[in-house]
Amino acid sequence: MWITRLTRQIEQLAASSRLIYSLAALYYRQMVQREAELAQIGPEDRVLCIGGGICPYTAILLQEYTGAEVTVIDNDPRCVEQCCRFLRGRGLDGIGVQFGCGTAVHCGDYTVVHLALQVSPRGEVLRRVLAQARAGTRILVRVPKASLEGPFQCERRVQHGTLSNVDCTFVLVAPGPRTQVAV
């Protein structure tokens, strides 16, 4: 997917340049602020970001805006290694980073789960999260532009700007573990 490759290239540049990092972070600021408000994230929350990449902008901004405890998982071991170096280099050791796959994630200890746009296979990861999450866990899912939401239609969502490749983010509330959810 071209957007995944482009995102990775931008993150590579941003990891080595504070200026490029700051410019790229502008893309995420309003989006993450809207998502934090939509899911009503506060300092008492534990947030799991599935798909963080080298520069986990969403995780960094969620922690900055809300004071929540944030953990990132990514299924690329090189990304995880580079992400850890990136966060240490910027004094952001408070964000946890783990290697893991969204289709095997255990999210029962989290009150909020955020699925990055590039998470794949999206439906399978979302089913896993819904099956593992505690009742009441808020799940934020970014939806790409020019995408039919299909089974992801939801009233509680925020639209994002025209210059974003993200159409909207919606929030689901988990019914609790071992509940069959058709996605």
Image: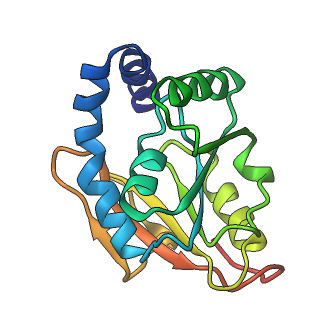
Quadrant hosting residue 120: top right
* Residue 89 coordinates in the image, percent (x, y): 50, 23
Is residue 36 among the parts visible in the rendering?
A: yes
Q: Residue at x 57, y 71 (%)?
A: 45
- In the image, 94: left or right of 150? right
Is residue 167 in view?
no
Q: Which quadrant is home to the C terminus?
A: bottom right
Determine whether, in the image, residue 28 is placed left or right of residue 123. left
Q: Would you identify the image quadrant in which residue 127 lies?
A: bottom right
Q: Tell me which corner region of the image, top left, top right, bottom left or bottom right, holds residue 57.
A: top left
Q: Residue furthest right?
A: 178
Q: Residue furthest left?
A: 162
Where does residue 19 sit, x and y in percent of width and height? Answer: 24, 21
Q: Position of residue 108 (x, y in %)?
A: 76, 69
Q: With 63 as the anchor, is 98 left or right in this view?
A: right
Please give left or right for residue 167 compared with residue 12 in the image: left
